[in-house]
Each structure stands twice: as structure tokens, then as C-alpha cells.
Image: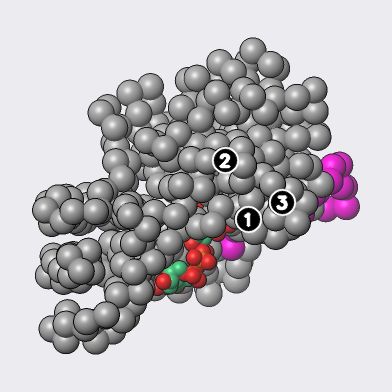
């Protein structure tokens, strides 16, 4: 491997470097929290954040939570799911863990290699008498096949839930993400283009489910001494809500930065043989472009990753090797990979490149030059 000194970054260039909103606005809200001495448990900033999100997403109910993983668990419990839930394996492992943590079995379906989201026929083939739901993922912010999945769910009497961890601010011709299935669950983790340090939110238009989720987020309490259902501690804190509110003011700016980064990568990578950019915004989609996902052909993905790392570019191979090859799933179902050919093929080719407000055009040019050097050898 050759190192081009001119392209070595002095500071590491991370995937998932947080976007930061206005510091002064945040400090003013933090100061109010000090004055109020109200730090968590359905505080005023959490309420304000929820109503702002509700308006932004155009959805009836938003329940802010401590993180997306707990949000997924609350929904699995709140819908009374049992037995098996069909999920992609090509996702962050939290999607499967949320099901397994509730004592249910995640059943892995394959993805469509064009979209990287659940393949509807693969889902159909995995439905059994034990299936209670489909949990699809808008991977990389690309909307899952929501219409077809909803039809399938209706045909078999299943619930459709959407892991929208990557899809805040994404909209399709049929509406904004947040309005599909029975509930959608967002992540506002630091690495997401819109963050609240840690955090997440459940969006739903179902009144009964929303009321139950509010209870279960807070141990099931319906009053000071009255617990009326199973619950957990999934509450968002006031300081996280403050960060969320501040970042919400800049969400369009972050989206524009991501889009312009994506376009620059697209122009620069177009001339390099052996690498293609994954399309996250098919026609009619408004994307947040929070992930720049490239596919490297010819078994050279790990060469690209290792050369980038030698130049201090910490690219990631999300979501290799697939949840089915991670514990505890690998031990339970060692042969699951046989039924997931597209998952395995895509997972071996993916490189996720740095984007967001911490990178500029010059850095993108240097990153793509490094990749060009690797693939020319
Ligand atoms: N569903 C899907 C489809 C998801 O992708 C995720 C999370 C979830 C559900 C669950 O959401 P949460 O329960 O987390 O709300 C990171 C995130 O921790 C995780 O939230 C995210 N997906 C996943 C894709 O990425 P790791 O294990 O890759 O994180 P880590 O510590 O390696 O950090 C990633 C990069 O970000 C590093 O290069 C360092 C950089 N970074 C990170 C943090 C926290 C910073 O520069 N600053 C920071 O503050 O999982």
C-alpha cells in the first residue's frame, strides 16, 4: 500500500461525526434547566420537542424516548407481539436485538440488492403461523417498500412497524416518513445527522398505542402510586430535548450540506472504475443523505477501507457481516446465510464514507483520490 502524504488527514476523519446546532441557543436552554431544577420525567422541553416533532413529521402522536432501541422494544411490547417478527439482517444489530430482548424470535429476510431494504417476496416466504409482525428498516434513509409491505401485512393480519433510525426528514410521494405502518421509530443518536446526544422518538397515528407507550416509557405509572401496565425506563432527559430543539432549527441546513457532499462524492467517484454510489433517493423522494454509501466490486472493499484508514479516514463497513452472523443469532441459526444471498453479497461490498458538517469539499476530493489510488493498483 502506498501512502500519499498530501492526502493524510492530520485529525481522524470519522463517519458519524455529529452535526452541532447553535451553541448559544443550547446554553440558554441548559441555563433554563438549571433554574427550573427539572431534569427529566416528562419535562417542559421534552413536551415542546414532542410537539415540534409532531408538526415537522405531520403525525398525530410523537413519544420521545431515551434511544431508538428502547423505542423499538416499547412498540413490540405495546402491540402485544408474540412468536416471530420478520426483519432484515442487513441493518444495525439493534433492530434484531429489540425483538430478541422482548423474548421473541427475529426471522431474517433478504434484501433487494437495488434498494438494500426488505425484499417483499423474501418476507412473504418467511411468514408462518407464528409470525405476528414485519419490522422493516428504511436503510440509509431510503424508504422501505411501505405500500407493498402494508398490503402483505394486511393480507396475513400482521402489524407493520418501521425502523426509521436513518430516515428523519425523509419524505416520499405518499407522505413523510413517520406516518407509515402502525408506528415508526427514529434515532437521534449523536451519529445521526439530526441528534439529541442520545435519543429517539416513536411516531404513530394510533391513539390507543400512543397512550400505552407514554405509560410504558415511564414504568407503567398512571399516577403517583398507580402502575397499570408493564413498563421500562425509556424517558428522554431535558438536556437531550434541548439539544434536539436546537438541532431541529438547523435540520434543513444539515440536509443541504449532506446533499451537496453526496453530489460531490457522486461526481468524483463517477470516474473511478470498481466503485459505485448507492442511490438513497429514488425519484419522488426527499432524502436526508445522511449516509454516503459506496459499493466496491471485485473483492476489493477491505483494501479500500484499509488504505483509507492509513490516511486517517475512518470509513466504516456498516452493516457487515449482517446481524445473522452476530451473536446470539449466529449460534442459534448457523445456516441462516444460505437464505440471505443478497444480504451477504451487499455486506461484502459496502463502504460508508464520512459526510456531514465536519467535512468540506477539499476533504471529499482527498478521500476520493485515496480510493482512486487503491482501485488503480
Ligand atoms: N436501527 C438502526 C437501523 C440503527 O442504525 C440504529 C443505530 C438503531 C436502530 C438504534 O438506535 P439508537 O438506540 O442508538 O438510538 C453507531 C450508533 O451508536 C448507532 O446509534 C447507529 N445506529 C449506528 C449505525 O452507529 P457504532 O457502534 O458504529 O458507534 P461508534 O461508537 O463506533 O461511533 C461511530 C462513529 O461516530 C465513530 O467513527 C466515531 C464517531 N462519533 C461517535 C460519537 C458517539 C463521533 O465523532 N462523536 C460521537 O459523539 O454505532
Label 1 crowding class (10 Å Cα cut-off): few <14, some 14-19, many 20+?
A: some
Query: Where residue 238 sits: x, y (%)?
Result: 55, 63
Residue named by callout 1? 325
Q: At 69% from the left edge and 16% from the top edge, which residue is drawn?
A: 156
- Which comes before the other along the chain, label 1 or label 3? 1
Tell me the CA gap for discs 2 and 1. Answer: 11 Å
Q: Does residue 232 show up magenta in the picture?
A: yes
- Residue 330 figure quarter: bottom right
- Which comes before the other along the chain, label 2 or label 1? 1
Query: Where residue 307 sits: x, y (%)?
Result: 30, 75
Q: Is residue 236 visible?
A: yes
In what element is the residue under mark 1?
helix
Residue named by callout 3? 334
Q: At 51% from the left edge and 30% from the top edge, which residue is drawn?
A: 119
Tell me the CA gap for discs 1 and 3. Answer: 8 Å
Q: At 34% from the left edge and 62% from the top edge, which residue is drawn?
A: 300
In what element is the residue under mark 3?
loop
Give the residues drawn in magenta, as a range. Answer: 220-237
Q: Is 313 placed above or below 170 here?
A: below
Residue 340: which disc? 2
**Residue most extreme to the top:** 155
Q: Is 337 placed above or below 348 here?
A: above
In what element is the residue under mark 2?
loop
Query: Where residue 205 sits: x, y (%)?
Result: 56, 27
Amino acid at each position: 500500500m502506498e501512502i500519499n502524504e498530501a492526502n493524510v488527514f492530520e485529525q481522524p476523519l470519522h463517519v458519524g461525526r455529529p452535526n452541532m446546532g447553535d451553541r448559544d441557543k443550547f446554553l440558554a436552554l441548559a441555563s433554563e434547566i438549571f433554574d427550573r431544577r427539572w431534569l427529566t420525567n416528562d419535562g417542559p422541553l421534552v413536551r415542546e420537542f414532542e410537539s415540534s416533532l409532531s408538526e415537522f413529521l405531520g403525525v398525530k402522536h410523537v413519544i420521545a424516548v431515551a434511544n431508538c432501541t428502547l423505542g423499538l422494544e416499547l412498540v413490540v411490547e405495546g402491540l402485544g407481539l408474540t412468536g416471530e417478527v420478520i426483519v432484515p439482517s442487513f441493518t444495525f444489530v439493534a433492530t434484531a436485538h429489540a425483538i430478541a430482548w422482548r423474548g421473541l424470535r427475529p426471522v431474517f429476510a433478504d434484501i433487494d440488492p437495488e434498494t438494500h431494504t426488505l425484499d417483499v417476496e423474501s418476507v412473504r416466504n418467511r411468514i408462518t403461523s407464528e409470525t405476528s409482525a414485519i419490522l422493516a428498516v428504511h436503510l440509509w434513509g431510503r424508504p422501505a417498500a411501505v405500500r407493498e409491505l402494508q398490503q402483505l401485512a394486511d393480507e396475513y393480519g400482521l402489524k407493520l412497524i418501521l425502523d426509521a433510525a436513518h430516515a428523519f426528514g425523509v419524505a416520499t410521494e405518499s407522505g413523510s416518513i413517520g406516518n407509515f405502518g402502525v408506528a415508526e421509530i427514529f434515532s437521534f443518536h449523536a451519529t445521526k445527522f439530526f441528534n439529541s446526544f442520545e435519543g429517539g422518538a416513536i411516531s404513530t397515528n394510533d391513539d390507543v398505542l400512543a397512550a400505552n407507550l407514554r405509560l410504558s416509557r415511564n414504568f407503567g405509572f398512571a399516577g403517583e402510586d398507580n402502575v397499570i401496565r408493564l413498563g421500562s425506563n425509556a424517558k428522554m432527559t431535558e438536556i437531550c430535548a434541548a439539544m434536539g430543539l436546537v438541532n431541529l432549527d438547523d435540520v434543513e441546513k444539515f440536509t443541504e450540506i449532506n446533499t451537496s457532499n453526496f453530489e460531490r462524492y457522486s461526481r468524483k467517484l463517477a470516474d473511478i472504475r470498481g466503485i459505485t454510489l448507492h442511490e438513497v433517493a429514488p425519484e419522488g423522494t426527499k432524502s436526508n443523505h445522511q449516509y454516503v454509501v459506496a459499493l466496491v466490486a471485485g473483492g476489493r472493499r477491505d483494501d479500500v477501507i484499509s488504505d483509507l484508514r492509513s490516511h486517517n479516514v475512518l470509513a466504516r463497513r456498516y452493516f457487515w457481516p449482517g446481524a445473522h452472523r452476530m451473536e446470539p443469532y449466529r449460534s442459534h441459526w448457523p445456516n441462516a446465510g444460505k437464505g440471505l444471498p443478497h444480504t451477504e453479497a451487499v455486506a461484502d461490498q459496502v463502504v460508508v464514507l464520512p459526510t456531514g458538517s465536519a467535512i468540506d469539499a477539499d476533504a471529499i476530493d482527498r478521500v476520493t483520490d485515496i480510493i482512486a489510488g487503491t482501485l488503480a493498483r
